[in-house]
Image (tube, rainbow, N blue to C red):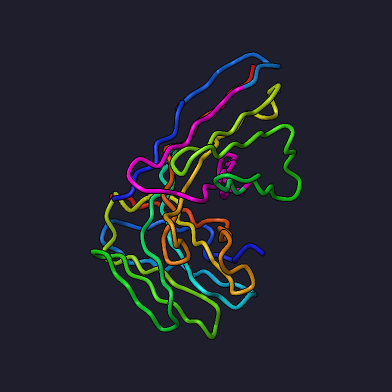
Amino acid sequence: QQPVQSPQAVILREGEDAVINCSSSKALYSVHWYRQKHGEAPVFLMILLKGGEQKGHEKISASFNEKKQQSSLYLTASQLSYSGTYFCGTESWENYGQNFVFGPGTRLSVLP
Amino acid sequence: GAVVSQHPSWVICKSGTSVKIECRSLDFQATTMFWYRQFPKQSLMLMATSNEGSKATYEQGVEKDKFLINHASLTLSTLTVTSAHPEDSSFYICSARERGFSNQPQHFGDGTRLSIL
């Protein structure tokens, strides 16, 4: 079952922060985050495996709340290059060892 | 880092033509590769999971006789769209995960934009 992402779209000014949420109705084993720019393939950002885990890459970080079956992606002091569609991919314990399911995406636009 | 090469990038052909798309993992072995289809402004829709040395597993609603998948080696999977029609026009993307993949991300190819006239 596809995870839910919110918001669907967000527009920011350069330097502003944003949070993208991803939630599932299933108990999750892992959450993956990807960014896709128009006309290109998705690019891997990070994977979260353990409840409570937080990871960061430059000014992009994420957390995984295993009990709530959700993850959040934090974009701090956004840059123009952050524009794109962000997808979470969730791997449930039910489908462990198989592929994960991508969310519908959150379209992020960073304006100068 | 892990690199997945997908070829061709663009295909424009007439209705009724069969089109083959290749997906290669260049610097790692991928026992499992995935094929996605994506329509404009939509999410990635998994079409099938390609397993080396065995038959592909197709998602519900995907015609296996229409979309032929072959995973001949640990580094190569192919998707053939047989007798393509305009409704098959889409962006097709492959991905691969390294062995022991449960803790590994998916690495995506650059995608193939297919246009059927």
Q: Which residue occupies 53% across, 37% down?
A: B72
Q: Is residue B60 left or right of residue A33?
A: right
Between B93 and A96, the one lying in front of the other is A96
Q: Position of residue B116 (x, y in %)?
A: 63, 21
Number of residue marks:
0
Q: As displayed, is residue A65 above or below residue B38?
A: below
Q: Is residue B43 in the magenta section?
A: yes
Q: Is residue A8 left or right of residue A42?
A: right
Instruction: Point out the residue furthest to the top here.
Output: B14
**Relative to A19, A25 lies left or right:** right
Quarter of the figure with residue A40 = top left
Q: Which of these two is toward me, A83 or B83?
A: B83
Could you tell whether A30 is left or right of B39 in the image? left
Q: Residue furthest front?
A: B53
Residue B49 against residue A53 in the figure, above or below:
above
Q: Quadrant of the N terminus of chain A?
A: bottom right
Above or below residue B46? Residue A73 is below
Q: Quadrant of residue A91?
A: bottom right
Residue B22 on the magenta span: yes
Q: Is residue B37 above or below residue B89?
A: below
Q: Pinpoint residue B7: horizontal percent, then vertical percent.
A: 45, 29
Q: Residue at x 70, y 50 (%)?
A: B59
Give the x, y percent position of residue B80. 61, 29
Depth check: B33 or A53 in front?
B33
Magenta stretch, overall SS: strand
Q: Give the residues in magenta.
A: B19-48
